[in-house]
Structures are given as C-alpha cells and as structure tokens.
Image (cartoon, rainbow, N blue to C red):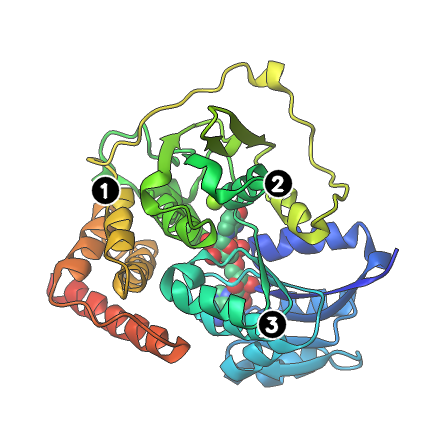
C-alpha cells in the first residue's frame, strides 16, 4: 500500500478534527503536507507537531510570531495570512480537505482546485458563493471534487455506476434541527440553537441547521455537484438522520445511503475513494433505532429552504448574496445582537433590496460580491 499525502484546510475545526482522527488511526499510510487554522495557534501547532506536517498556516497574519514560537524546535514551516492559506492549498498533495467555514474558505478552495488534484469539499459556502465559477475551474484544471457533506456524499454514493439522465428525483434529508418542535422561535438562545440533536458540529453550521439555511445551502451545493436540474431536488425532514439522502431512478428504484451520524463516515468515503477504509464508527443498529420517520419541511416557520431555492433559481449573484447575508446574520445571532427569526428576515431583506449585481465570472467577482453583500447586511442590521 502506497503512502498518500494530505492537506487539511481548517484542521482545528470539527471536520478537520474528524479527518485527523481517521489519519491518526492509520498514521503509516499518510504524509501530512499542510494544516491550517484561523486564530487557534495552540491547537494548530500541536496538530502540526503530532502529524509531522511540512507546513502550518495561521490565517490571522499577526499571529505569525506566536505560531513560530509554538513550533520552535520542530521541522514544521510556519506561515500566516490569506495568501499563505492559498499557498498551502496549492502545495502538491494527493488530497486536500476543504474544511474552513464560510466564504473565507473560497480562495483556498480555488487554489486547491487550480492545482488539479482531488479536493474533498466540506466548505459548502465556497461552492454556494462561487457556483459555476468553481465548477468551471474544476473542469478546466482537471480537478476532482469529492463531497464530504453527508447528504452529498450519500448522493454521490447512490449515483455510482448510474447516469444522471436516469435520475427522477434526488431527495435531501434534513434532521429538522434542534428547533423543529420549539414553539416560540424568538426566544431561542444561541446555546439552544447550537445544541444539535444528532450531530456535533461547529457553531456556524449548527445555527444553519437550526434555521434550515444549512439545507438551503445544501440544495444549492447539490445542484452544482449533481446537475440534474433544480426541479428534481426535494427536501424531506427525517429527524433520526439515519438516511443521509436518496436518489430515485426513472424505473422506480430508490437508492439510499444509511449510516451513523458521524462525519467520519463520509470523510472516510472521500479519503479512500474509490476504495473503502475502516472507521471506528458504531455499526448501525436498526432494531435499536426502531423507527425512521419523514415529514414535509415547514417553510412557514423556517423560510430558509424557500429563500435558497429562489436564489438558486435566480442564479447569478443571488446565491453568493444569500450566503453572505446569512454569514453576517449568524455571527450577529451568536454574538447576542439579534433574535433568531431575524436571521432569515435579514437574508430575505438583503436579497430583496435593490438590484442584484451581475453574475460573477471570476473568483475576484465573487469575493467583491460577497463583501458588498456583507456591508449591506451589516448596514441593515444597524438601521433595522
Ligand atoms: P468549525 O468552526 O468547527 O471549524 C472551522 C475551521 O476553519 C477551523 O479550523 C477554523 O480555524 C477555520 N477558520 C474559521 N474561519 C476562518 C477564516 N476566516 N479563515 C481561515 N480559516 C478559518 O467548522 P466545521 O468543521 O463545523 O465546518 C467546516 C465546514 O464544513 C463548514 O463549511 C460546514 O458547513 C461544513 N460541514 C461541517 C459539518 C460538521 O459536521 N461540522 C458537516 C458538513 C459540512 P480556528 O480553529 O483557528 O478558528
Ligand atoms: Mg450536511
């Protein structure tokens, strides 16, 4: 068995940690090229030492001195700043795991794509914002995107060996989040919103899961990854999170992927693809789970999936604007500045207010759009 090399963008996060956990169990099989973080110097340095990384990059430029100090006496090279994140992503490696949160991860993902290798994509906001700019770059550079997001990984597996032309429906399952049965959404605190019933994730995606923006972003992500047409995607609430998504074919067969709610399963599927590898995950015990249930989403209470579908239908700049507004709203909610229901109303307001800019044609266009939409969202939060 040949050793393989890996770079992890966002190594100190939830997906980054799950990825490193798999690698830790089979140390001899992997060379770690680069690990990155945003501000968490201590964890980054600890992980870079443990895994013998060639390079550790901290996003916040002013922490370079701290990082150098934390890595003193090791062979790990230290770097900092936005450009260094892209350089880490561009280093030759068999696989780059894109696990930065938010549109902040877009430039590094594009750098990883431009190197022409395999990119395991967790960072959905990057694909939502860049859309065709990213999918065109994937084609141009002969890169391969493997979906880490559990739903998309499930769809990817259910599509294997089949033609997209034969697909009748793709059904994204949604847990419904921690607030599905909560009466008064306005009294929801950040702590309640991030307490997900099935998954242990970073704060931003946990809030997205509570608002259902996560499923909205995933719908946009899915229609780029699996171009069967937006009208062939459906969302169904499935609170047990056992079925991670399904594909129905024109002959009436539906294939589903099942598994425990543990990101190490889809991550392992990407790391080993097209083969399989061991994970320490508990086997599924369906008799213990007992029942699987399904509901239509409630878009009156949780308008996010409707907003996302409309943005995807509008195309062009709309998905990037939706994503940027949501990122600003989630940060404000987590900081205790706005109520829960203001998240989706702000996103709707930013999308409605004024003409959308033209469709982005390049990475620079997307980044400019993202910045402008953030400014508009922040201004609206101040003026109410
Ligand atoms: P976390 O918040 O746990 O981790 C985010 C990682 O990105 C950290 O390493 C963080 O560094 C780094 N980071 C944060 N902001 C920046 C920035 N501005 N520039 C550079 N690096 C940054 O997130 P998750 O692991 O939960 O999620 C990562 C991505 O994966 C998201 O897009 C999410 O939607 C997606 N995803 C996550 C799942 C999960 O189970 N967690 C499931 C499916 C998808 P630092 O530690 O220094 O802040
Ligand atoms: Mg998901």
Q: Position of residue 127 (x, y in %)?
A: 43, 61
**Marker disc for residue 184:** none
Q: Which residue is mark 2?
A: 161
Q: Which residue is mark 3?
A: 41
Name the residue: 45% across, 38% down. 196
For the residues carrying marks 3 and 2, which lies nearer the camera in this image?
2
Name the residue: 36% across, 36% down. 234
Dot 1: what SS? Answer: loop
Dot 2: what SS? Answer: loop
Decide: few, some or many residues near mark 2? Use Cα within 10 Å; few <14, some 14-19, many ≥20. Answer: few
Q: Position of residue 67 (x, y in %)?
A: 64, 79
Decide: few, some or many residues near mark 3? Use Cα within 10 Å; few <14, some 14-19, many ≥20. Answer: many
Q: Which numbered disc flags the more N-terminal residue, 1 or 3?
A: 3
Name the residue: 52% across, 72% down. 140
Is any atom of residue 38 visible in this view? no
Quick one: 68 or 327, which is closer to the camera? Answer: 327
Q: Position of residue 157 (x, y in %)?
A: 59, 40
Q: Assess mark 2: CB under 8 A from ligand 2?
A: no
Q: Assess mark 3: CB under 8 A from ligand 1?
A: yes
Q: Position of residue 110 (x, y in %)?
A: 51, 72
Decide: few, some or many residues near mark 1? Use Cα within 10 Å; few <14, some 14-19, many ≥20. Answer: some
Q: Which numbered disc flags the more N-terminal residue, 2 or 1?
A: 2
**Horizontal side, residue 40 vs residue 68: left or right:** left
Residue 68 falls in image quadrant: bottom right
Quick one: 166 or 315, which is closer to the camera? Answer: 166
Quick one: 1 or 378, which is closer to the camera? Answer: 1
Q: Which residue is mark 1?
A: 303
């Amino acid at each position: 068995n040949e050793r393989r090399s890996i770079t992890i963008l966002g190594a100190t996060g939830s997906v980054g940690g799950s990825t490193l956990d798999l690698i830790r169990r089979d140390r001899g099989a992997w060379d770690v090229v680069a690990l990155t973080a945003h501000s968490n110097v201590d964890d980054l340095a600890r992980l870079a030492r443990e895994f013998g990384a060639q390079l550790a990059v901290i996003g916040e430029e002013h922490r370079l001195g701290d990082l150098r100090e934390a890595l003193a006496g090791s062979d790990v090279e230290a770097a900092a700043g936005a450009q260094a994140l892209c350089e880490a992503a561009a280093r030759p490696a068999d696989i780059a795991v894109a696990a930065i949160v938010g549109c902040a991860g877009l430039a590094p993902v594009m750098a990883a794509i431009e190197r022409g290798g395999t990119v395991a994509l967790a960072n959905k906001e990057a694909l939502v914002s860049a859309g065709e700019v990213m999918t065109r770059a994937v084609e141009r550079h002969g890169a391969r995107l493997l979906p880490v997001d559990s739903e998309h990984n499930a769809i990817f597996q259910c599509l294997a060996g089949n033609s997209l032309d034969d697909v009748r429906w793709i059904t994204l399952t949604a847990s419904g989040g921690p607030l599905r049965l909560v009466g008064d959404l306005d009294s929801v605190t950040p702590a309640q919103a991030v307490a997900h019933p099935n998954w242990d994730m970073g704060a931003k995606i946990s809030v997205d899961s509570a608002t259902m923006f996560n499923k909205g972003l995933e719908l946009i992500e899915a229609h780029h990854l699996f171009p069967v047409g937006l009208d062939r995607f459906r969302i169904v609430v499935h609170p047990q999170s056992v079925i991670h998504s399904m594909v129905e074919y024109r002959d009436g067969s539906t294939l589903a992927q099942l598994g425990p709610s543990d990101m190490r399963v889809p991550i392992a599927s990407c790391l080993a693809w097209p083969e399989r590898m061991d994970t320490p995950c508990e086997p599924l015990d369906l008799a213990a789970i007992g029942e699987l249930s399904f509901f239509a989403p409630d878009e009156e209470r949780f308008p996010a999936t409707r907003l996302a579908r409309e943005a995807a239908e509008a195309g062009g700049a709309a998905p990037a604007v939706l994503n940027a507004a949501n990122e600003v709203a989630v940060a404000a909610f987590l900081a205790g500045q706005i109520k829960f229901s203001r998240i989706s109303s702000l996103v709707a307001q930013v999308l409605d207010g004024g003409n959308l800019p033209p469709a982005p044609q390049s990475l620079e266009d997307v980044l400019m759009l993202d910045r402008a939409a953030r400014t508009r969202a922040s201004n609206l939060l101040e003026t109410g």
